[in-house]
Amino acid sequence: MPERNRVTPFGDIIAMPTRGAWTGNRGQLHRGHEIVRNHAGDLWITCELQFRGRWHEQWQPGRYTYLYFFDEAVSLAAGHRPCAECRRESYNAYRAAWAEGLGVALPPAKEMNRQLHAERTVRGTHRRRLHRMPWADLPAGTFVSVGDAPWLVLADELVEWTTSGYERHTDRPRRGDATVITPPSSVAVLGNGYPVQIDRSAANGRVLDPGRRP
């Protein structure tokens, strides 16, 4: 049986059969093998599965809880950012795209952590914050909520994410507003060229070229 340590685009921690392309953490969330809270602070990062031969056993007392993401687009939607240690190149690219997308100086990690936390969580609660944004402004790699289900935005279509991976495809709307799951700052990062990793199953047998905007 799978452990309850997989993360959905909404940021929920569940048990599901798909393997993770990335790991990461939000601090210590477990007691024994049970998840007892959603997060333990505003530091939410995405990490390499292996880094310099390090290996740590799961569910250790007093250690942070290892979480797993189907692909990087899921991790960004959940509200995580690249780790500055094991993913330094990706962290630098994310940070540079953040500065360009938001028109600010290169931000320190703590500033990004605070802003992402405000964007992903309703203040004073553990409820997820969603955002309304025009369909035309959404770069590929963004997740939206359609009928309470998470869908990945590609150049000209949407792909449904499920606990078994990507499945149905549909045309991407050209007009109106979307209910966006990915935090606005990460949407800006994607729109300014951050090379997000998307699982090949989203391509539906084609060469995946998500593009930035239609």
Image (tube, grey):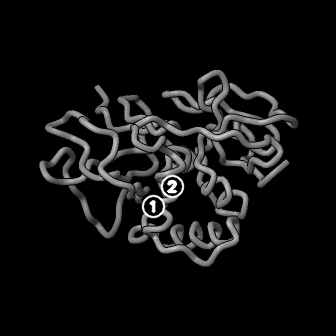
Crowd class of label 1 (few under 14; some 14 to 19; many from 20; radius 10 Å) = many
Q: Is residue 174 above or below residue 189?
A: above
Which residue is located at x 46 percent, y 60 percent?
A: 114
- Horizontal relation, residue 12 to residue 103: left or right: left
Do the residues under discs 1 and 2 have CB atoms within 8 angstroms? yes
- Horizontal relation, residue 47 to residue 118: left or right: left
Q: Which mark is residue 82?
A: none
Q: Amino acid at mark 2?
A: Leu
Question: Quadrant location of residue 151?
Answer: top right
> Mark 2 falls on what kind of element?
helix
- Horizontal relation, residue 148 to residue 212: left or right: left
Residue hosting label 2: 116
Q: Is residue 112 above or below residue 171?
A: below
State the residue lying farthest toward the bottom.
105
Residue hosting label 1: 113
Q: Is residue 203 above or below residue 90?
A: above
Residue toward you, 9 or 72: 9
Place of residue 51 in the rendered image (x, y in percent of width and height, measured from the top left): 35, 65
Which residue is located at x 31 percent, y 30 percent?
A: 2
Residue toward you, 51 or 84: 84
Which residue is located at x 40 percent, y 42 percent?
A: 124
Residue toward you, 28 or 86: 28
> Mark 1 falls on what kind of element?
helix
Crowd class of label 2 (few under 14; some 14 to 19; many from 20; radius 10 Å) = many
Question: Quadrant location of residue 15?
Answer: top left
Which residue is located at x 41 percent, y 58 percent?
A: 47
| Label 1 to label 2: alpha-carbon separation | 5 Å
Q: Amino acid at mark 1?
A: Asn
